[in-house]
Image (cartoon, rainbow, N blue to C red):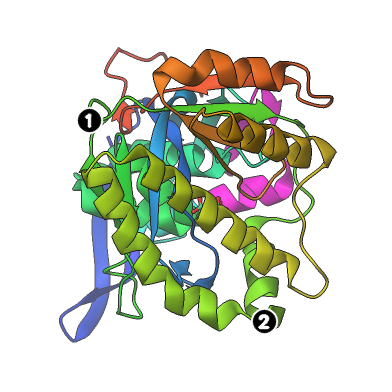
């Protein structure tokens, strides 16, 4: 056990210092990635990372991040190993800032973090979602805080908006808060991973890191896309309809709303100046193949995030048909099949020190 001092801790009307305890033992957390069926795009505050719209997502069993974090009394700087490599300076800075927020101070103990994704990082497969959800959980535990799911989701959101949803299993909703301090901006669970056996097939069309981060993309869109206001104002209706469709297990409606939200978001981003296009040729070809499948009576629907991968929502009995349709597309490198997955959790096995 170690201790650190948080200066300027706000208490009532006065600020003062408080002493906080933290653990010197390693903590390992696992969080699964999630894919938004109703998309989030745009921030009402970049500083607090507050979304401009709510979102609804599905947490996936097949894609996860495993993060081990250990605070050390003798460490001078944070250290981040991402997928077996020393992380880049910007990635380390983002993680260090996040740990400052989690600890409530930059005078916190420094940490070593080892994080691994079982899928390509930063290529539109929601690695920041699973990454920051796992980090929030590991940091909270390492800092000796006992955080509710709501508090964890709020903390994860500060790392990445979509991470707020990866705290939960299955279907979850990122709520749109009204307050400026972000206290109401956290996700809530809708239905767990056993509620509805749907599948999401991920057609990987590139494993390169995207050129434009989602934050930059969102800011440019909000500043320059002429329909941004309509995106924000029409969004609550998409949220309402999607919650109803999922509650009724209406697959067709869920699929239609998923595709609608995806194209609404990408159309909006394409209307930014300069335009934002995350797709490649295989992305477009995959969309058309899925639409041909649908014409032939196979209910399958696409969704795409800030990257070129296409995610196809279907029912278990149609997985083979969708895989067949994807198998001969030039540029589709692999297809990952995912089911609804679990929420974030701590691995309770005794971990060896990593420092
Ligand atoms: O949480 P971020 O900053 O990675 O943004 C996520 C944006 C989308 O993936 C495109 C949509 C979403 O709601 O996940």
Residue name at image x 38 percent, y 47 percent: 253
Q: Earlier in the sequence, mark 1 or mark 2?
A: 1
Depth check, front residue: 288 or 170: 288
**Which mark identifies residue 223?**
2
As drawn, the label of residue 242 is none
Q: SS class of the residue under badge 2? A: helix
**Which residue is the site of mark 1?**
195
Q: Relative to 89, is 106 on the left or the right?
A: left
Task: Point out residue 103 in the picture as x, y percentages from the top left corner.
Answer: 36, 54
Badge 1 marks a residue whose secondary structure is: loop
**Quadrant in the picture for residue 273:** bottom right
Q: Residues within 10 Å of mark 1 (few under 14, many from 20)?
A: some
Give the magenta-colored segment's residue range: 76-95
In the rendered image, is residue 115 in sight?
Answer: no
Q: Point out the residue furthest to the left here.
A: 12
Q: Residue at x 70, y 51 (%)?
A: 90
Q: Quadrant of the N terminus?
A: top left
In this view, 238 is above or below 61: below
């Amino acid at each position: 056990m170690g201790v650190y001092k948080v200066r300027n801790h706000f208490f009532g009307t006065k600020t003062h210092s408080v002493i906080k305890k933290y653990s010197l033992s390693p903590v390992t957390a696992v969080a699964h990635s999630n894919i938004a069926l109703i998309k989030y795009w745009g921030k009402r505050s970049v500083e607090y990372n507050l979304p401009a719209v709510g979102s609804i997502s599905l947490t996936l069993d097949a894609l996860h991040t495993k993060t081990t974090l250990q605070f050390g009394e003798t460490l001078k700087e944070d250290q981040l190993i991402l997928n077996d490599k020393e992380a880049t300076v910007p990635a380390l800075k983002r993680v260090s800032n996040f740990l400052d927020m989690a600890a409530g101070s930059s005078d916190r103990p420094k940490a070593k973090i080892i994080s691994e994704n079982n899928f390509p990082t930063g290529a539109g497969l929601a690695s920041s979602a699973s990454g920051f959800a796992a980090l929030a959980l590991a940091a909270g535990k390492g800092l000796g805080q006992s955080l509710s799911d709501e508090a964890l989701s709020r903390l994860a959101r500060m790392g990445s908006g979509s991470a707020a949803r990866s705290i939960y299993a299955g279907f979850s909703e990122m709520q749109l808060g009204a307050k400026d301090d972000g206290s109401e901006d956290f996700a809530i669970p809708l239905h767990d991973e056993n509620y509805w056996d749907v599948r999401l097939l991920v057609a990987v069309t590139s494993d390169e890191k995207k050129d434009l981060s989602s934050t930059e993309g969102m800011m440019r869109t909000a500043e320059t896309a002429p329909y941004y206001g309509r995106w924000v104002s029409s969004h609550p209706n998409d949220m309402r309809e999607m919650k109803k469709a999922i509650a009724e297990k209406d697959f067709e409606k869920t699929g239609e709303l998923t595709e609608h939200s995806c194209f609404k978001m990408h159309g909006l981003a394409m209307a930014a100046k300069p335009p934002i296009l995350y797709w490649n040729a295989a992305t477009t070809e995959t969309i058309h193949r899925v639409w041909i499948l649908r014409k032939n009576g196979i209910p399958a629907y696409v969704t795409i995030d800030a990257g070129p991968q296409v995610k196809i929502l279907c029912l278990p009995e149609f997985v083979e048909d969708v895989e067949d349709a994807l198998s001969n597309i030039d540029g589709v490198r692999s297809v990952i099949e995912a089911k609804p997955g679990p929420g974030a959790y701590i691995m309770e096995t005794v971990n060896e020190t990593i420092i």
